[in-house]
Image: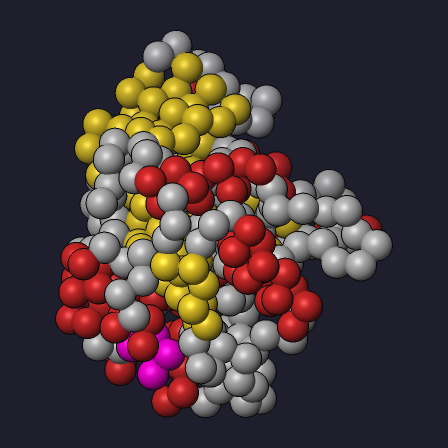
Amino acid sequence: MKKHIYIYSPSGAVRDKAAFKRGIKRLQQLGHDVEVDADALTSHMRFAGDDATRLQSIHRACASGADVALISRGGYGLTRLLADIKYKDVAKAVDRGTQFVGLSDFTAFQLAVLRKTDRITWAGPALCEGFGVGGPGNVEAPDDIMEDCFNDMLLGQGEGSGWRMNAVPNALLEKPDVLLSKNGQIWGGNLSIVVSLLGTPYFPMVKGGILFLEDVAEHPYRIERMLTQLLHAGVLAQQKAVVLGQFTDYTLTSHDRGFKLQSVIAWLQATLKVPVLTNLPFGHVPTKVLLPVGAKAELAVNGRDAMLVWGHVG
C-alpha cells in the first residue's frame, strides 16, 4: 500500500529538524513515497516563511496530486492566510483524492475549507509530533493507534471510532443505548482556533452537528472562557452533542482552590441541554484517532462507552 505523501509547512517554522527527518523516515519505512515541499523548512520570524511563501506551499500541496497533504507542524499562522487561499483549488484537490491532514493551527484551514467548499479534511497527526517522535536515547515510537488510524484513512477503511468516557456524573447519559445523532456533521478541532473564527466568513454555520474540541497549554479558566464565548454566541446549543477531547499541558496554581478541568466540564454539562461527552482520544497527545471534518456521522453512547460512526469517506 504505497501512497504519495506531500509534506508542507503552512504555519509555524520547524525548529526540531531531527523530528522532521525522523517523521519522513518513518513514513518511508511504512512504505510511502514522501515528497517535501520546497519551503517546508523555511523560517521567517516564528513562521515557516512569510505569508506569501506559506500560501504558495498550500497551493503546491493542492497541485501535488498526492494521496495525503500532511502538515509538518502546527503553531500559528494559518488565520493570516485564510482570505487568500484558493478554495476552488483545495476543493479540486480533495475531489481528485488528496486528503488534507493535520491538527492544532490547521483547524483554521479545515473550518475555512468546510465553510467555503463543504469538502472533508482530516483532523489527525502532524509530521513532527505524530511520526517524528523519539530521538537519541529515547525509545518513544509513533503511537500504534495513531498509525493504525492513519493507515485506515489511507485505505478508506477508517469508518468510525469508539472510546470510553471519564467516570463522572452525567445525567444526560444515564440511560443505556442512547442515539445522540443519526446524521450530524463532525466539525471542530482546536478550541482556541475555533473561537478565533467566530464572526468571520470562515466559521462553519453548522447546526445539528457533532462539535469536537481539544486544546493545549490553556488553563481550565481560559478553556471555560472560550466555551462561554461559544455558548453566548449560540453555537453550542445548536449542536447535537459537544465532544471534549484532550486538554493537556497546563499548570494549576494555589490560587485555583480546587477549580480544575473537571470543574469546567461539570459547569458545561449543567449549563447545556446538549449532551457533553468526554475523553475523546484526540488532541496534543500521542494516542489519537483521525476524524473526518465535515463528514456526517452517527453518535451513540451506552453508559460510559461512546461510538462515533461515519462510514466510508473518500
Question: Foreground: 312 or 187?
Answer: 312
**In-image side of 188 versus 245 (left or right):** left
Question: Foreground: 301 or 3?
Answer: 3
* Residue 314 rendering spot, x and y as whole percentages: 22, 45
**In-image side of 302 versus 203 (left or right):** right
Specify the segment rendered in magenta.
Answer: 55-59
Q: Would you say residue 172 is visible in this rendering?
A: no
Question: Foreground: 256 or 147?
Answer: 147
**In-image side of 115 versus 169 (left or right):** left
At a point 26% along the width and 65% down the height, the residue shown is 65
* Residue 56 rendering spot, x and y as whole percentages: 34, 83
Tell me: residue 203, above or below residue 312. below
Is 295 in the magenta?
no
Give the total of numbered labels. 0
* Residue 105 rendering spot, x and y as whole percentages: 46, 65
* Residue 83 rendering spot, x and y as whole percentages: 27, 80
Picture quarter with the N terminus: top left
Question: Foreground: 19 or 123?
Answer: 19
At a point 54% along the width and 80% down the height, the residue shown is 41
At a point 39% along the width and 38% down the height, the residue shown is 152
Quadrant in the picture for residue 202: bottom left
Quadrant in the picture for residue 257: top right
Q: Would you say residue 9 is visible in this rendering?
A: yes
**In-image side of 14 versus 177 (left or right):** right
Tell me: residue 208, above or below residue 250. above
At a point 16% along the width and 65% down the height, the residue shown is 92
